[in-house]
Image: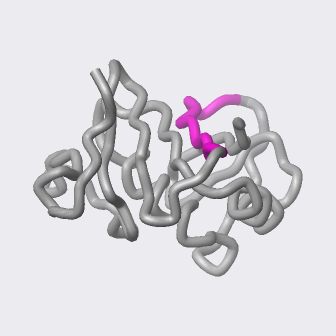
Amino acid sequence: MGPTIGSEEDDVLDLDLDDVDVPFEPVDVLGTEHEGDTLTVYTVTGGGASLVLSAEESSRTRSTPVTETDLTAPLRTGLSYLFRDGIRTVRVRIPPESATDALSSLGTAPLYRYDGLSFTASAEN
C-alpha cells in the first residue's frame, strides 16, 4: 500500500488527540503511512531522508532533557505523533540537510527526554 499523500487535511492520519496531551500540533504534513507501531509522515518539503524518532522505555540510561527551543519544526512534528498511543517510531520525510539540522539542534546524546517522553533521534537516507 502506497503512502496517503494529498493536500486535504482528511489525508492526515487521524489519531485521537482527545485522549493524549500532545505538546505540539503537526505542521506541514501532506500525508501519513501507518504500519504497526511505525508512522511515516510526509511533509510539504518532501525529501530523500527521514528524521527517525523512537520512543524508549524509561531505563537506567540517563536521558538528556531538551526544551522547546531545541526543537526544529520536523522534530516538533515527529514528537506530536510519538506522544500518541500505539506509535513507537515516527519517520518524518524531509530533505537531508533538514534532518542534519534537526539532529544538530539536539546535540549528541544517545537518549533525549521531552515532557516525560524518552526518545532516540537519528537520520536515515
Q: Residue furthest right?
A: 108
- Residue at point 53% right, 36% down? 55
**Along the line of sight, the residue nearer the viewer: 77 or 93:** 93
Point out residue 40 in the picture as x, y percentages from the top left corner.
43, 38
Instruction: Residue 114 in the image: state x and y as whole percent.
Output: 57, 59
Magenta stretch: residue 101 in it? no
Measuring 41% from the left and 47% from the top, which residue is drawn there? 41
Q: Residue furthest bottom?
A: 69
Residue 11 on image: x %, y %: 18, 50
At 64% from the left edge and 45% from the top edge, which residue is drawn?
Answer: 48
> Is residue 87 shown left or right of residue 112?
left
- At a point 39% along the width and 68% down the height, the residue shown is 28
Question: Image quarter for residue 72?
Answer: bottom right
Colour scheme of this structure image? one colour
Q: Is residue 76 left or right of residue 123?
A: left
Q: How many marks?
A: 0
- Which quadrant does the C terminus fall into? top right
Q: Position of residue 108 (x, y in %)?
A: 88, 52
Give the quadrant of the N terminus.
top left
Left or right? Give the position of 107 relative to 19: right
Residue nearer the viewer, 88 or 45: 45
Q: Quadrant of residue 121?
A: top right
Which segment is the magenta one? 49-59
The kind of secondary structure the magenta stretch mainly shows is strand
Q: Quadrant of residue 95?
A: bottom right
Residue 116 position (above or below residue 68)? above
Left or right: where does residue 87 sit relative to residue 7?
A: right
